[in-house]
Image (cartoon, rainbow, N blue to C red):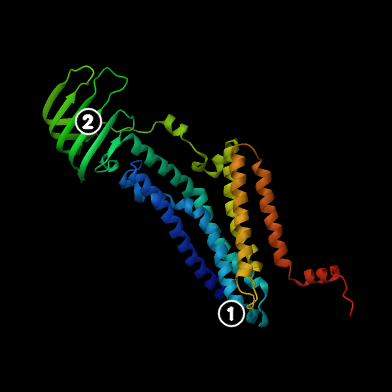
């Protein structure tokens, strides 16, 4: 039907526009956080883009339901403001046509939400953690910032590199304190060097014309060594199974794994994902009656209550998840209570202007006596 296709087309275009705006907002926030970590030296600069791409899954969890909600609210608000919806009803268009169009859009959005929560989100969470952990275990030149003093992961050395160009490094300063060992503190200075890799994947740091000063002021015993070619080999480390189990998180588990793990955190994560999936059709059908407005009243009379209901829903869901993960609440009861309440609210709003409901309201309204 032409009207059905028109409603789907206009609402979907609005949803895509809102989705793009929301994505840019969340993407910018994520970019700022990652760049600040990269400036502090916590994240190598070569991992900025991979971490951003892997972080899309966490953004999609919230912006997919919100984009459909706002898309319906804005598109239908325009229909009412421009009297298009009044013309549709006057021409005999039934409400079921509108519900069918929204159901079609809900199925599309819900399909992407399910794919994200079932597959992409757990996988991206695992990949993101592995990238960060491997960068911490195997520090390279990508994690060293030019012109800054930085400590190693163990905290027993301080490294300064004046300039980094590809694999070439200049103005190198390395101070080794060697805490807890019999070796004396030492300082290594070199004007230039380079980084190589062998066939086994080991990282070889080669310093040209390096000077090593070993000793301390307390002992008053210094050893000064000069090297035409100073080499240091750094063997790559890998995450062991013990490390992976210790760092295991519920956001990295699939639905089946969450059902098997009988912990408060796993239950909260399971019902949180289920609620995200249910929120797509639930909030979509809830906003249909809320988007209706009188052209003389303006759009804010309907938009503000709708957005307020949406914010209250997700704030309640987030609060339940936070408390249920700590064992303070039963996630089964409270998640179902909130979803059930909003489902009844959606049904009530959608049948409020129906003919049977109008008859009930008329009977319950006290009879007005003529003056």
Residue 54 seen by the camera = yes
Left or right of residue 176, residue 333 in this image? right
Left or right of residue 340, residue 208 in this image? left
Give above or below for 328 relative to 76.
Answer: above
Indicate the position of residue 212 as horizontal and vertical percent values. 16, 27
- Determine the CA span between mark 2 and mark 1: 72 Å
Left or right of residue 126, residue 3 in this image? right
Query: Which of pointers 2 and 1 lies earlier in the amino acid sequence?
Result: 1
Give above or below for 365 relative to 29.
Answer: below
Q: Quadrant of the N terminus?
A: bottom right
Count neighbours of disc 2 (C-alpha within 10 A) and say few if under 14, some if 14 to 19, many if 20 or more.
some
Q: Residue at x 65, y 76 (%)?
A: 294
Q: Residue at x 34, y 39 (%)?
A: 135
Count neighbours of disc 1 (C-alpha within 10 A) and say few if under 14, some if 14 to 19, many if 20 or more.
few
Name the residue nearer the viewer: 281 or 359. 359
Indicate the position of residue 53 as horizontal and vertical percent values. 39, 52
Q: Nearer the viewer, mark 2 or mark 1?
A: 1
Indicate the position of residue 355 as horizontal and vertical percent values. 77, 72
Residue 284 seen by the camera = no
Q: Secondary structure at mark 2?
A: strand
Q: Residue at x 74, y 67 (%)?
A: 352
Name the residue nearer the viewer: 121 or 21. 21
Q: Residue at x 48, y 36 (%)?
A: 248
Q: Which mark is residue 82?
A: 1
Mark 2 sits on what residue? 233
Indicate the position of residue 167 as horizontal and vertical percent values. 19, 43
Q: Secondary structure at mark 1?
A: loop
Q: Quadrant of the C terminus?
A: bottom right
Name the residue nearer the viewer: 149 or 208. 149
Q: Which mark is residue 30?
A: none
């Amino acid at each position: 039907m032409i009207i059905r296709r028109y409603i789907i087309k206009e609402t979907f275009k609005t949803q895509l526009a809102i989705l793009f705006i929301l994505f840019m907002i969340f993407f910018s926030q994520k970019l700022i956080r990652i760049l600040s970590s990269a400036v502090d030296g916590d994240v190598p600069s070569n991992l900025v883009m991979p971490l951003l791409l892997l972080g899309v899954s966490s953004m999609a969890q919230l912006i997919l339901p919100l984009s459909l909600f706002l898309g319906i609210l804005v598109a239908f608000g325009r229909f009412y403001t421009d009297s298009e919806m009044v013309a549709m009803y006057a021409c005999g268009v039934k409400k079921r046509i509108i519900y069918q169009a929204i159901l079609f859009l809900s199925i599309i959005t819900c399909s992407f939400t399910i794919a994200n929560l079932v597959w992409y989100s757990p996988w991206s969470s695992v990949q993101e953690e592995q990238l960060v952990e491997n960068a911490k275990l195997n520090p390279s030149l990508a994690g060293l910032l030019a012109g800054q003093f930085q400590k190693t992961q163990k905290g027993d050395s301080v490294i300064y590199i004046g300039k980094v160009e590809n694999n070439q490094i200049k103005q190198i300063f390395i101070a080794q304190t060697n805490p807890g060992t019999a070796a004396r503190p030492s300082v290594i200075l070199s004007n230039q060097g380079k980084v190589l890799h062998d066939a086994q994947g080991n990282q070889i740091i080669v310093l040209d014309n390096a000077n090593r000063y070993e000793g301390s002021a307390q002992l008053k015993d210094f050893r000064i060594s000069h090297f035409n070619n100073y080499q240091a080999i750094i063997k790559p480390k890998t995450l062991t199974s013990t490390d992976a189990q210790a760092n295991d998180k519920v956001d990295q588990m699939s639905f089946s794994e969450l059902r098997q793990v009988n912990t408060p955190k796993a239950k909260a994560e399971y019902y949180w994902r289920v609620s995200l999936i249910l929120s797509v059709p639930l909030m979509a059908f809830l906003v249909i009656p809320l988007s209706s407005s009188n052209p003389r009243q303006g759009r804010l009379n309907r938009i503000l209550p709708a957005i307020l209901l949406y914010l209250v829903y997700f704030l309640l869901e987030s609060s339940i998840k936070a408390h249920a993960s700590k064992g303070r609440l039963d996630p089964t009861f409270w998640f179902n209570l909130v979803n059930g309440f909003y489902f009844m609210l959606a049904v009530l709003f959608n049948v409020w202007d129906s003919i049977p409901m109008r008859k009930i309201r008329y009977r319950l309204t006290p009879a007005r006596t003529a003056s």
